[in-house]
Image (cartoon, helix red, strand yellow):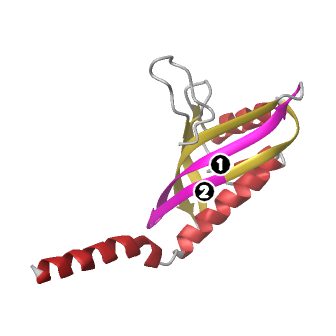
Amino acid sequence: MKEAVFLLGILLVTILSGPQARAESKDEKEIKALENRLAAALKSKDADAVMSNYVADASLVVFDVVPPRQYVGAKSYRKNWQGFFDSFSGPMTTWEITDLSIMTDGNLGVSHSIQHLTWNDKDGKQIDVTIRATDVYRKVGDKWLIAHEHLSVPVDPETGKADFSSAE
C-alpha cells in the first residue's frame, strides 16, 4: 500500500510539474514573437505588416469568423484585412492574446489562443469581440510564417447566434 501511495504521489508531481518545468524552445519563442508582431500590426491597422506574418503565396488558407467561408491565397486575405481596417475609425484599441499554447516539430508548428479585440466603428460605437484562434506555422528559411489560420466563436445551438463575448 505504501508503494502505491508513493507511486501515485510521484505520478501527480510529474503531471503537475511537467509543463511548468519545460523550458520554452527557440521555435516557440520565435512564434510568440510573431504573434506579438501581428498584434502590433493589427493595432496600427497596417495590412502590409499584418501580412508579413503569413506565407506570401497561394498556399495560405484562412477560415475567418465572418463570411466568406474561406480565403485562399495571401492576396485575397490581405484584401480582407484592408477592408476590415477601412470599416472602423482610429486605431484598434485592444488586441490581447491569452491562453497561447504553441507546439513545434521540425518545420511545422501549431498554436491556439483566445484573442480579445475592441475598436470603434465608423459611427463611434465600440465593438468588443472575443475569438478563438488556431494557427498552423511553416518555417520558411529561418522564419516562421502562418500557413493556415482558423478563427471562430462559440455558437449557441438553441438560438443559432454567435457568441462574440464568450469569456469561458
Asked whether disc 2 touches disc 1, contact meaning CB atoms under 8 Å apart, the reply is yes
Asked which secondary structure carries label 2, the reply is strand
- Give 100 or 125, whichever is nearer the viewer: 125
Asked if 6 appears above or below 90 in the picture, the reply is: below
User: Quadrant where the N terminus lies?
Assistant: bottom left
User: Is there any visible trace of residue 59 in the rendered image?
Assistant: no
Disc 1: CA contacts within 10 A as few (<14), some (14-19) or many (>=20): some
Residue depicted at x 55% and y 21%:
161
Q: Residues within 10 Å of mark 2 (few under 14, many from 20)?
A: many
Q: Nearer the viewer, residue 112 or 162?
A: 162
Question: x, y (%) of residue 136?
Answer: 51, 51
Predominant secondary structure, magenta span: strand
Expressed as whole percent of the image width and height from the top left, the position of residue 158 reads 45, 18
Point 58% across, 48% down: residue:
114
Q: Which residues are magenta?
A: 97-122
Which residue is denoted by mark 2 in the rendering? 145
Residue 120 shown in magenta? yes
Residue 144 part of the magenta-drawn span? no
Specify the label residue 56 is tagged with: 1
Q: Give the image location of residue 97, x and y in percent.
A: 64, 53
Does 96 sit left or right of 45 as displayed? left
Q: Amino acid at mark 2?
A: Leu
Front disc: 2 or 1 = 2
Q: 86 and 147: which one is in front?
A: 86
